[in-house]
Amino acid sequence: MSNRNDIKPPSNAADVIVVGGGNAAFTAAHAAAIRGRRVLVLEKAPQELFGGNSYYTAGATRIAHNGLPDLKDFIEPDERHSLTEVPPYSPAEYARDMEKVTEGRNDSELTEVLVNEAGPGLRWLHSLGLKYRLMYERQAYKRDDGTFLFWGGLHVGNVDGGEGLMHDHVKVAQKLGTEVRYDQDVFDLLVEQDAVVGVKVRQPDGTVVELRSESVILASGGFEANRDMRRSYLGEGWENAKVRGTPFNTGQMLTAALEIGAARGGDWSSCHSTQWDAFTPNNESNRELTNRLTRQSYPLGIIVNVSGDRFLDEGEDFRNYTYAKYGKPILQQSGSVAYQIFDGTLRPMLRAEEYDMPGVSVQTADTIEELAERIGVPPEKLAKTVNDYNNSIDTSIPFDPNIKDNRKANTTPVKSNWATPLETGPYYAYAVTCGITFTFGGLKSDTHGRVLNTSSEHIHGLYACGEMLGGLFSGNYPGGSGLAAGVVFGRRAGSLA
């Protein structure tokens, strides 16, 4: 009979286990692997559906910088650079934007880290093999003199968007020797003596295995793909929102962390939600069209509900600061549907990748009344809405989509910028609904991603990053700050785990 002291403890599957497979997860894995840690990434999706929510994004990432000369060391060369102005965007401006769009509900300490480390984070990822560029098609309009002016504080994105981002991440992981397993349904945490020592994983055949490690980094997203949790935390009606990204972010590991005493962080009652194609078949978790199902040229036109009424300020601010909150008021309209209206003059300015999408939900007509009939809106009501809008615009103010031009429509509700009369046929109506991207509530942590319990103490061995990290966003967010946060706090977690 062997001596009790001869019994060896179970061996670890890795030094660090990362749960999830998006931008934050792989960033954390890279940071740990570079330190010589043996890293295991566990992704719930099958390999053909890899990439988490990040795969479905445009790849835009908000960073502070000192203008185009400061970016050229890590962005791809482009012949348009010599014709391009990229205004500097300071960490202070970044922090002010965070505070503005969240109405001061953002965590100031997390924000300070984000705004100062996003730029260095992208340069670090570029040194590992990720590729970045200026996002001309999304963040700049070509001016009459042939030059480009970038706007809205969001200028840099991944080559080939979210798909390129995640393919690059996987290549880096392979180069660093990180093991990645797919079809891994991680559903619980292993805890011994108040420390997290691994995870429980359901395999494709239904068997459950326990995988042990020194640290676990949770990067498996929020609960946006869970209808019941959406209804419970976001409110009635949210079960009807369309899931833009991965269908695997069901909140399972948020629940598992809360069950071992982790504290909630951030705003569990709000989320990132946008205007999304309403009627195109397969308009959820679409791997082929991904972000092309968004409709983000709305600041140029007007948005009406099925009664023919406008109900929000389309020109309140640059799209980057409003798009993530305008899914909610559309969800609240009758049938959770609205229509973006443009005329023949504005139509060429719409984003080609979105508005020329195959199967796009659009109706066209030579008159507003005909258009109304085709979309099932009372013709006399839509005509009155358009006439009131047209007649309230001071057209003596120059129209300039590259700046907040103060060209208002003084009607109800007001349109604060970029108001242009809709008076040239043909007219276009794009049907939109609410597309949910990710939920803002998550786990509470310190600025290094170390998860805190309800007594504000570290849960030893447990980290969180990406959309599982609560506290940065509430009600809204500045475009591109989600991927930036994944980089910053994924890198921080992986540097400690």
Image (cartoon, rainbow, N blue to C red):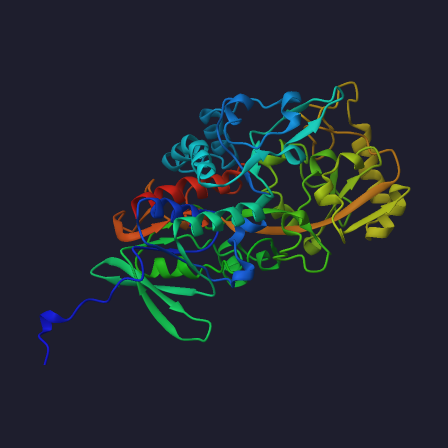
Q: Is residue 322 above or below residue 409?
A: below
Residue at the (25%, 64%) spot, across then down: 11
Q: Is residue 414 above or below residue 341?
A: above
What is the quadrant of the N terminus in the image? bottom left
Number of disc labels:
0
In this view, the residue in front, 109 or 84, is 84
Q: Is residue 47 above or below residue 165?
A: below
**Residue 488, quarter of the rendered image:** top left
Q: Is residue 100 left or right of residue 494?
A: right
Say whether residue 402 is visible.
yes
Where residue 403 appears, x then y in whole percent? 65, 24
Residue at the (49%, 32%) spot, across then down: 63
Where residue 234 appears, x then y in whole percent? 52, 53
Q: Is residue 112 left or right of residue 78?
A: left
Q: Is residue 409 above or below residue 25?
A: above
**Residue 284, quarter of the rendered image:** bottom right
